Image (tube, rainbow, N blue to C red):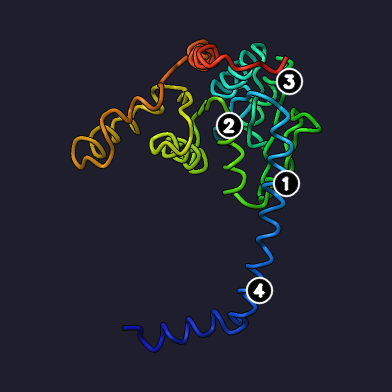
Amino acid sequence: MLSDKDKKRIKRAFANKRWPEVASTNSWSIFKIMAELVDGYQNLARIGPCVSMFGSARTKPGTRHYELAQTIARKLSEAGLGVISGGGPGIMEAANLGAKEGGSASVGLCINLPFETSNNEYIDKDKALMFDYFFVRKVMFMKYAQGFVVMPGGFGTMDELFEALTLVQTDKRAKFPIVLVDKAFWQPLVSWIEQSLIEEHAYVSPGDTKLFHLVDSAEEAVDIVLDFYSEYSLKPNF
């Protein structure tokens, strides 16, 4: 039962919002969503096989994780695979820099955020896409990737990782390699999955831990992706 205080608070919150106006605004936003989807489909379909790379935007150049991401992206690019990042700083910048160095497609799926005012400079000019909606952007990350390389990161990285795991687990997306880089960083999360989600509650199946790979080196990460690439005979971007 709401108190009078809560009722007054709710009334104030919606004092300037009439529901017909809200409904109308939501309806028009559908066209913006459709436009972002169409733009993404048309642009990314031309690029060819790619790997999506995720990780923290706060990672600084010169750090181990930055340089590791850069090396992985460069090696993948040298093998002819394009690299898709979120277009921002940190690991995203490292991924696009590595792709540039390797000579393959360097794609940035950028998002309008108040605290990220510009894209990194290593995205190919014709492969920088801007999104307002996180969920549309995630569709592009998933749909056009032949592999995921996930570097250490925060909430956004975890969101993208578990989205990928869920889609593969439920067969909504064809299986593809999901590589978690830096065992020491990821092991506590993996242990929680094994102990809490599997052993204590059986919320996921024991075999679900095989949906991802833990690695420490750039060579391991690249080998896993390229083994998948060879198995399915994907045509590289060269």
Q: Amino acid at mark 4?
A: Ser
Label 2 sits on residue: 59
**Residue 188 x %, y %:** 33, 31
**Residue 236 x %, y %:** 66, 16
Q: Amino acid at mark 3?
A: Lys
**Residue 80 x %, y %:** 67, 14
Label 3 sits on residue: 100
Between the residue at mark 3 and the residue at mark 1, the CA separation in whole angstroms equals 22 Å
Badge 3 marks a residue whose secondary structure is helix
**Residue 44 x %, y %:** 70, 34
Crowd around label 3: few <14 · some 14–19 · many ≥20 (10 Å): many
**Mark 4 vs 3, N-terminal side:** 4
Label 4 sits on residue: 24
Q: Is residue 57 left or right of residue 192?
A: right
Instruction: Tell me what residue is drawn at x 60 percent, y 17 percent.
Output: 234
Between the residue at mark 2 and the residue at mark 1, the CA separation in whole angstroms equals 17 Å
Whether residues under marks 2 and 4 lie with C-beta atoms below 8 angstroms apart, the answer is no
**Mark 3 vs 1, N-terminal side:** 3
Residue 18 circle label: none
Whether residues under marks 4 and 3 lie with C-beta atoms below 8 angstroms apart, the answer is no
Nearer mark to the viewer, of 3 and 1: 3
Badge 2 marks a residue whose secondary structure is loop
Badge 1 marks a residue whose secondary structure is loop
Q: Amino acid at mark 1?
A: Thr
Between the residue at mark 3 and the residue at mark 2, the CA separation in whole angstroms equals 19 Å
Say which quarter of the image contains residue 103. top right
Label 1 sits on residue: 117
Crowd around label 2: few <14 · some 14–19 · many ≥20 (10 Å): many
From this viewpoint, which residue is outermost toward the left? 200
Nearer mark to the viewer, of 4 and 3: 4
